């Protein structure tokens, strides 16, 4: 058995997962081995780390962290980091290879990538690096008021999330936009059409950001500048939209940590 120091700072005996991970170290690939060593050596404090932190410290990518969790029958990093410190009586009786869950391939892929697609990673990293995102953040920083509206019921999930992060309220339909007001229009799940496009943006003139299902796009020809997200499959839209709303929140409030 490879000699790796167990992190037992919690004062409890090592969890079954921690012992199993140490036992399986020689059989792991180099990438997974680096992740496992970090997890073993920092088990007691791993729940304070983000998946990005673990991947960076292990010299790999977040997807490798997720793969390590799945090797031990866990769904992902969140379950892994808490299972490492769980008391034995609370743990699953067996740690097994994950079975086929019967999910549609798109859904299974989205679930596997959920943590690797977190803030600052993957396609989102490229999205927030675009000039349009920086311009949007700059515009919202100078806004007198920020209003967030949704194009449909599902979009309201993202709109509510964004309102909470930005600490803003719903716009009052009876209150016209004032100079310096900005509107963030969320249309992630359904396209904006003449039938579904909310009426409120008309009163904001060019001061509208559209968080829609598309790639980042800068509207021209007199239209508003906008953030538009286009995701590859339906199953990924909500995840990435929520992540992008976190990116907006973190950019506007850098002192407030984004969700782990």
Image (cartoon, rainbow, N blue to C red):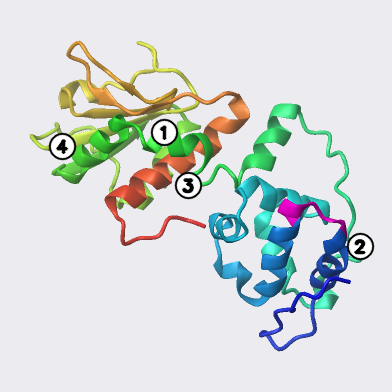
- The Cα atoms of the two marked residues, 4 and 1, are separated by 25 Å
Q: Earlier in the sequence, mark 1 or mark 2?
A: 2
Q: Earlier in the sequence, mark 4 or mark 2?
A: 2
Q: Alpha-carbon neighbours of circle 2 within 10 Å: few (<14), some, or many (≥20)?
A: few
User: Is 236 above or below relative to 91?
Assistant: above
The residue singled out by tag 3 in the image is 119
- The Cα atoms of the two marked residues, 4 and 2, are separated by 56 Å
Residue 178 at x, y percent in the picture: 10, 35
Q: Secondary structure at mark 2?
A: loop
Residue 94 at x, y percent in the picture: 91, 62
- The Cα atoms of the two marked residues, 3 and 1, are separated by 11 Å
- The Cα atoms of the two marked residues, 1 and 2, are separated by 41 Å
The foreground one among 219 and 20 is: 20
The residue singled out by tag 4 in the image is 181
Which label belongs to residue 127?
1
Which label belongs to residue 94?
2
Q: Secondary structure at mark 3?
A: loop
Q: What is the magenta segment's predominant secondary structure?
A: helix
Left or right of residue 28, residue 243 in this image: left
- Asked whether the beta carbons under mark 3 and mark 2 sit within 8 Å of each other, the answer is no
For residue 156, say whether it is visible: no
Front of the two marks 4 and 2:
2
The foreground one among 50 and 212 is: 50
Q: Earlier in the sequence, mark 3 or mark 2?
A: 2
Q: Earlier in the sequence, mark 3 or mark 1?
A: 3
- Residue drawn at x 75%, y 86% is 12
Question: Is residue 13 part of the magenta span, yes or no?
Answer: no
Q: Secondary structure at mark 1?
A: helix
Residue 14 at x, y percent in the picture: 79, 79
For the record, the magenta segment spans: 27-32
């Amino acid at each position: 058995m490879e000699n790796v120091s167990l992190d037992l700072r919690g004062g409890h005996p090592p969890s079954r997962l921690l012992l199993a991970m140490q036992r399986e170290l020689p059989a792991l690939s180099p990438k997974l081995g680096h992740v496992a060593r970090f997890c073993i050596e920092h088990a007691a404090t791993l729940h304070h780390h983000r998946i990005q932190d673990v991947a960076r410290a292990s010299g790999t990518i977040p997807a490798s962290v997720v793969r390590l969790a799945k090797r031990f029958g866990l769904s992902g990093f969140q379950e892994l980091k808490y299972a490492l410190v769980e008391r034995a009586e609370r743990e699953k009786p067996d740690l097994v290879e994950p079975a086929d869950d019967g999910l549609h391939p798109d859904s299974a892929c989205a679930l596997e990538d959920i943590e690797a697609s977190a803030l600052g990673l993957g396609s989102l990293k490229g999205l927030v690096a675009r000039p349009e995102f920086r311009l949007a953040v700059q515009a919202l920083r100078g806004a007198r008021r920020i209003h967030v509206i949704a194009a449909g019921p599902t979009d309201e999930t993202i709109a509510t999330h964004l309102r909470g992060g930005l600490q803003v309220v719903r716009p009052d339909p009876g209150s016209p936009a004032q100079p310096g007001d900005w509107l963030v229009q969320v249309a992630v799940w359904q396209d904006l059409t003449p039938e579904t496009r909310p009426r409120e943006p008309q009163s904001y003139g060019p001061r509208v950001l559209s968080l829609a299902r598309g790639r980042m796009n800068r509207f021209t020809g007199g239209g508003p500048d906008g953030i538009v997200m286009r995701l590859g499959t339906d199953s990924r839209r909500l995840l990435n939209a929520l992540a992008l709303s976190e990116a907006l929140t973190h950019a506007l409030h850098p002192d407030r940590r984004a969700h782990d």
